[in-house]
Image (cartoon, grey):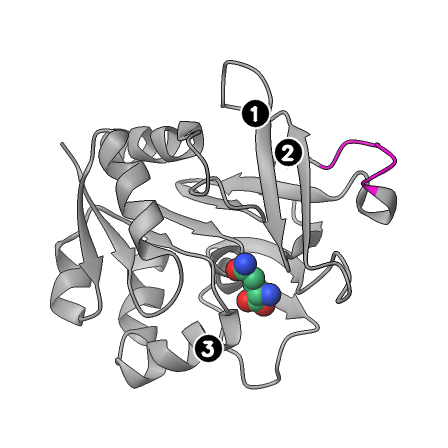
């Protein structure tokens, strides 16, 4: 069974740990360089990307994490995690750090500052068994992506989606996976199972 880390500086670490464990992985929390060095793959949970970025510096994880991602460590980012993995962020804080891994531009809090959350059923490529119920919480979307980035899901054109219709909300580039939504909330662990599979095959 692969050993997967969950970055445990901020965010919903417990939910990711449960989903990955159910998906067949051994899971540890990662706060130190020694823990990062041990894992076969890493999950970056949702939370606040500016805060996680700052904590990565404080915990001296920023450069080691960039290095492991550049070396091809499978990584999955949800919401704030997606923001951190993008090459570039719009509406970010000027001092917020990017980890890279996904050759794309994200827009932070893209669904509108007034709209705290939004839910929609989405088809996700690589996830079999019907659409996923996706929960977006002050979520980003992908503003633009290079052809190297595979689009796994876009927001369907429903009345509730409004201006978000057609926006990219799940992507994969090599072994780096990201969703703007939070599949760790609720009982559907198919995205986590997909990630455990990616780690197993890498
Ligand atoms: N708005 C947050 C950010 O900018 C992301 C929200 C989330 O992860 N649920 O990082």
Q: Are marks 1 and 2 in contact (CB under 8 Å)?
A: yes
Residue 36 in the figure: left or right of residue 15: left
Local crowd at mark 2 within 10 Å, few (<14), some, or many (≥20)? some
Q: Are marks 2 and 3 in contact (CB under 8 Å)?
A: no
Residue ID for mark 2: 153
Q: Please state the extent of the stretch shown in magenta in the rendering.
A: 155-161
Residue ID for mark 1: 125
How far across and how far down the image is residue 52, in percent?
Answer: 42, 73
Instruction: Determine whether the residue tagged by mark 2 lies in a helix, strand or loop.
Output: strand
Which of the two residues, 18 or 41, is positioned nearer the viewer here?
18
Dominant SS in magenta:
loop
Q: CA distance from mark 2 to mark 3?
A: 27 Å
Which of the two residues, 48 or 103, is positioned nearer the viewer here?
48
Numbered mark located on residue 7 in the image? none
* Label 1, ligand 1: CB separation under 8 Å: no
Point out the frontmost of discs 2 and 3: 3
- Kindly identify the residue that appears in the image at 49 percent across and 59 percent down: 85
Q: Is residue 108 above or below residue 148?
A: below
Q: Are marks 1 and 3 in contact (CB under 8 Å)?
A: no
Image quarter for ligand 1 equals bottom right
Local crowd at mark 1 within 10 Å, few (<14), some, or many (≥20)? some
* Label 3, ligand 1: CB separation under 8 Å: yes
Residue 196 in the figure: left or right of residue 93: left
- Kindly identify the residue that appears in the image at 47 percent across and 64 percent down: 47
**Quarter of the N terminus within the rendering:** top left
Instruction: Determine whether the residue tagged by mark 3 lies in a helix, strand or loop.
Output: helix
Residue ID for mark 3: 51
Q: Is residue 120 above or below residue 46?
A: above
């Amino acid at each position: 069974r692969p050993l997967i880390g969950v970055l445990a500086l901020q965010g919903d670490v417990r939910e990711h740990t449960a989903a990955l464990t159910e998906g067949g992985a051994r899971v540890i929390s990662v706060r130190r360089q020694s823990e990062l060095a041990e894992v076969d793959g890493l999950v970056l949970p949702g939370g606040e990307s500016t805060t996680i970025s700052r904590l990565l510096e404080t915990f001296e994880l920023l450069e080691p994490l960039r290095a492991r991602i550049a070396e091809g460590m499978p990584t999955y980012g949800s919401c704030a995690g997606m923001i951190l993995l993008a090459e570039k962020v719009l509406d970010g804080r000027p001092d917020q750090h990017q980890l890279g891994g996904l050759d794309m531009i994200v827009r932070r809090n893209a669904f509108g500052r007034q709209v705290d959350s939004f839910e929609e059923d989405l088809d996700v490529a690589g996830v079999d068994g019907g659409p996923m119920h996706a929960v977006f919480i002050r979520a980003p979307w992908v503003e633009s992506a290079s052809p190297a980035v595979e689009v796994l899901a876009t927001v369907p054109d429903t009345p509730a989606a409004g201006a978000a219709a057609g926006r990219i909300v799940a992507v994969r580039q090599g072994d780096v996976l990201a969703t703007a939504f939070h599949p760790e909330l609720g009982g559907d662990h198919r995205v986590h199972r997909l990630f455990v599979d990616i780690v197993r095959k890498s």
